[in-house]
Amino acid sequence: MRGETVFKKTFNRTLEYLITSELKRPLPSENILTERLKASRTTVRKVLEELHARKIIKGSAAKWLVARHPKPTDFFPDNETVTTSAQVEKKFMEWMLRGDRKAGDIVNGLELARQFEVSTSAIREYLNRFSRFGLIERRPNSSWIIRGFTKEFALELFEIRELFETRSAIAFATQSENSPTWQSLRKLESEHRALLKTISNRHQDFSDLDERFHRLVNNASKNRFIVDFYDIISLIFHYHYQWNKVDEKQRNRAAILEHLDYIDALTSRDPKRVVLACMSHLNSARKTLLASINVQSASAADQQQ
Amino acid sequence: MRGETVFKKTFNRTLEYLITSELKRPLPSENILTERLKASRTTVRKVLEELHARKIIKGSAAKWLVARHPKPTDFFPDNETVTTSAQVEKKFMEWMLRGDRKAGDIVNGLELARQFEVSTSAIREYLNRFSRFGLIERRPNSSWIIRGFTKEFALELFEIRELFETRSAIAFATQSENSPTWQSLRKLESEHRALLKTISNRHQDFSDLDERFHRLVNNASKNRFIVDFYDIISLIFHYHYQWNKVDEKQRNRAAILEHLDYIDALTSRDPKRVVLACMSHLNSARKTLLASINVQSASAADQQQ
DNA sequence: ATCCATTTTTTTGTTTATAAAAAACAGTTT
DNA sequence: AAACTGTTTTTTATAAACAAAAAAATGGAT
């Protein structure tokens, strides 16, 4: 019943590893592979068996040898390596954010299950977890109801975000000087500068960097509720910005500059400067999101016609 | 598969209603009963059928008449009227808060299912929903892990609570004068005064009043994240204080007085006074919780020996 | 004794099944 | 036509089944 996504993902990851390894070289022990591949030994063993069956490795369990380098066709296709829950998340977020769902609309679990081609339990499980993001609400013994991805939602989200992040930023700035986070900050700073130079080629990467930076700041709060709250931001940004490519390059450039200013302020350890830089960055982030919501609801309205 | 808890609960509620109604009086229509009993018409009809079978009502669907008053034995026992999920919540909270779970302990879904005598799906569903409260955490493809109901948890909880509630309280105080919430506040005030007089008899009710008061304040924020956050507070307080009866009377008396002061401050609409009253109340609430955690972990340690 | 491979046991992820409850539909009566 | 009851269809809550994956126990070699 359970899919084989973990196995396939681990298999692909192993192939990745074998590409760079020398032929006829013995593989590391199962225990070591387990750690490297981040799966259980049971799965690793299954992967090794499969590799043997496909003659990518030879010998016996005691000492596997690399027989040949893997070919692109050896890999399992990407879509077979995503878990049901990840699929549901992706499909649900599309359905939710692109489908122009209005506040008060009802979520029909059965219909979603049919539409997404997964079981109703997968939907139920997802909705239960998703409810904490404040976009849906449950009525007991009845269906879920949509609260709407609206301007109000974005404003409420950012109200909390500001509250949390200014507090975190101050906590960050007042950390002991020999906290390892300062080093992480410096590393992020240089990544920002690097990205600024090559922005034209890979402005994709900004999203990643953005998340890592803000998470670093928020983690300084040492408060699980603040840290966890970033999951919501992260999810919304991840899915929402995928479809809003307008001015992306410019937006990202501006954001990087703001981040650098923010990093400077943190390094100065001056609370006033920190709050200022933080607020000013979050303000423009909010503007971007709000603009983006307008664009989205307009295009959704178009599609409906 | 599904239990009949909704039916039984509705049945009991209907009996409650029939106690006060006159004999030989026709019952309201199904639609009206549906609204009053807060269940679907399907359930209401099933209840009516059962009442007829037991000869508590007579006649036909067109016009049911009260045949006799219900006896205490007619009621379904209380434990049959709680849904599985409510049962799981209760049992899980006991297990969690009284069992002296330590950070890093692993939650075994299968074992919990056996222990609580429910299916694993019920456990899964609950854990998923419960995860937002920050007491447990999921590791993918593996079990849930406990983050611990510790001093740290309480402090983190209260950090957010203060952040949220001071903001809400200010929003409350700066509401338009003709907002209906002012009336709710006045009503709560008089309930507080009433409770203060009879505190000796029913200091149970304080918990209820406390929740209603704080929810009213938090709702003024008009922010779903703030409003929803109160669910955590509410859950923790509900279960945690059930077992900490030491000095309860005194504590509640003090809290009522603080509430009254807080209400006064709100009524004055002076932000400074509001913040002061709010903070001072939350400070003592935190102290109470922290003291209570110490007591609990001490007694849990005793039990272990 | 320590490390590693094999085997066995346990636990989790997902689907499927089914009764309870809700909702929709269709006539009837007032 | 509004409000009611009878009937049918949908949807949800929960359990149960089962394969995948993880974890633990076992045994063997260095």
Image: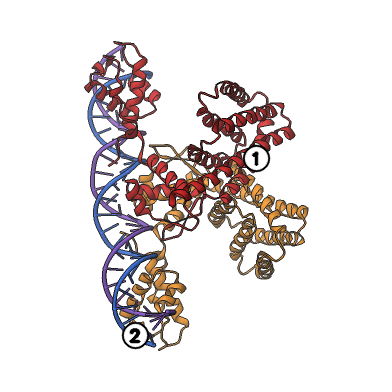
Chain colours: A red, B orange, C blue, D purple
Percent position of residue B158, x then y: 63, 47
Amino acid at the residue labelled 1? Asn
Residue at point 64% right, 45% down?
Answer: B159
Q: Is residue A279 above or below residue A298?
A: above
Amino acid at the residue labelled 2? Lys
Local secondary structure at mark 1:
helix
Percent position of residue A44, x then y: 32, 26
Instruction: Identify the subunit bearing mark 1.
Output: A
Figure quadrant of residue B67: bottom left
Residue at point 35% right, 41% down?
Answer: A84
Which of discs 1 and 2 lies nearer the camera? The answer is: 1
Contact (Cβ within 8 Å) of mark 1 with mark 2: no
B279 relative position to B245: left or right:
right
In depth, the one of B6 and B71 nearer the eye is: B6
In depth, the one of A158 and A27 nearer the eye is: A158
Residue at point 27% right, 14% down?
Answer: A68
Local secondary structure at mark 2:
strand
Percent position of residue A107, x then y: 42, 55
Mark sitting on residue A185? none
| Residue on which disc 2 sits | B58
Q: Is any part of residue B202 visible from this angle?
A: yes
Q: Is any part of residue B118 visible from this angle?
A: no
| Residue on which disc 1 sits | A283
